[in-house]
Structures are given as structure tokens and as C-alpha cells.
Image (cartoon, rainbow, N blue to C red):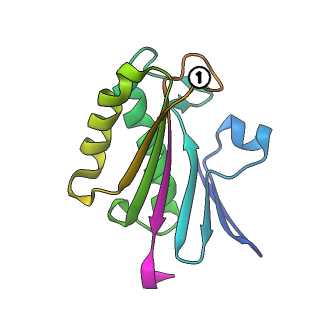
Amino acid sequence: MSSVEAGRQGTRVFSGGIWEERYGYARAVVAGPWVLVSGSTAAVDGEVVHVGDARGQALTALDIALAAVEEAGAGREDVVRVRFYVVDQHDFDAVGTALGERFGDVRPACTGVRVAGLVDPRMLVEIEVEAYRGDRW
């Protein structure tokens, strides 16, 4: 379940994820025409899903991120940048394939980075998304 709060610094979107409350951040922040989505993983209801499956985790993380984009009033077609972080270099192709499945001809700018680890050792990928709503704000 998500919620949206408006404040002086812009609109915040919350997905109800356990780390948002624990660590004090929003799933996404709307700043003018921009929708900035925090790093999303394959954590659903506090549990990591698709353990051992980087593609499955990437698809889940993207679905969570894109839900926040939509909650903020933008769409998949408005996504202009994606950053993803993988623990194992062998997962770059699986994550890239998942990005292609979700974005198709949108083709946002993208950066992939290998990292030493994520907050839970079962997590293989974390994905950040930025969308630009143009003149719709």
C-alpha cells in the first residue's frame, strides 16, 4: 500500500516498505517536474523474493520503482535515467534483460555498477529510477 504526502520540499511517495520507516526516507520524491525514486530491491512485505534469481529480483525492483513513478503522476515513458547496482558481475546481463523487458522502446539513460553488497545478502540487485514529467507539473 502506498501513500502520498505533500510538503514544502515537494511530494513524497511511500510504499510502506520496512526500510522507508526504519531509515527515514521516501520511496520517491517529486521535485518540480522530476520524480526521483529511491533504490528499490526485491523486498516485498519485508521479505526478499526471487532469492538467487537476479532477473526476477530486477523485475520486482523495477515494478516497485515504476509503481512509485505512477503514484507520482508520471509513467514508464517518462523515465529518463536508471541506475542499477549488482553484487555479482555475472548478473549484469540478467538485469539488463529485465530493463529491456520493462522499458522496451523508452530506452532511458542507464548506469550499471558492481558493488560489494546490499543491505540483505540475499539481495542481488538494487535499482534507482528518475522520471521527468515535463510540462505536466
Q: Quadrant of residue 62?
A: top left
Residue 129 on the magenta span = yes
The amino acid marked with disc number 1 is: Ala
Q: Which residue is mark 1?
A: 116
Q: Residue furthest left?
A: 105
In the structure shown, which secondary structural element does the residue marked by tag 1 occupy? loop
Residue at the image position 44 percent from the left and 67 percent from the top: 74
Residue 126 x, y percent position in the rendering: 52, 35
Q: Residues within 10 Å of mark 1 (few under 14, many from 20)?
A: few
Residue 44's place in the image compared with 31, above or below, is above
Residue 37 x, y percent position in the rendering: 55, 54
Residue 8's place in the image compared with 130, above or below, is below
Residue 100 on the magenta span = no
Residue at the image position 20 percent from the left and 57 percent from the top: 105
Along the viewing direction, whichever of 96 and 52 lies nearer the viewer: 96
Residue 77 x, y percent position in the rendering: 32, 64
Q: Is residue 31 left or right of residue 65?
A: right
Residue 21's place in the image compared with 49, above or below, is below
Along the viewing direction, whichever of 71 and 33 lies nearer the viewer: 33
Residue 27 x, y percent position in the rendering: 62, 51
Residue at the image position 51 percent from the left and 61 percent from the top: 71
- Extent of the magenta region: 127-137
**How many badges with numbers are in the image?**
1
Residue 50's place in the image compared with 71, above or below, is above
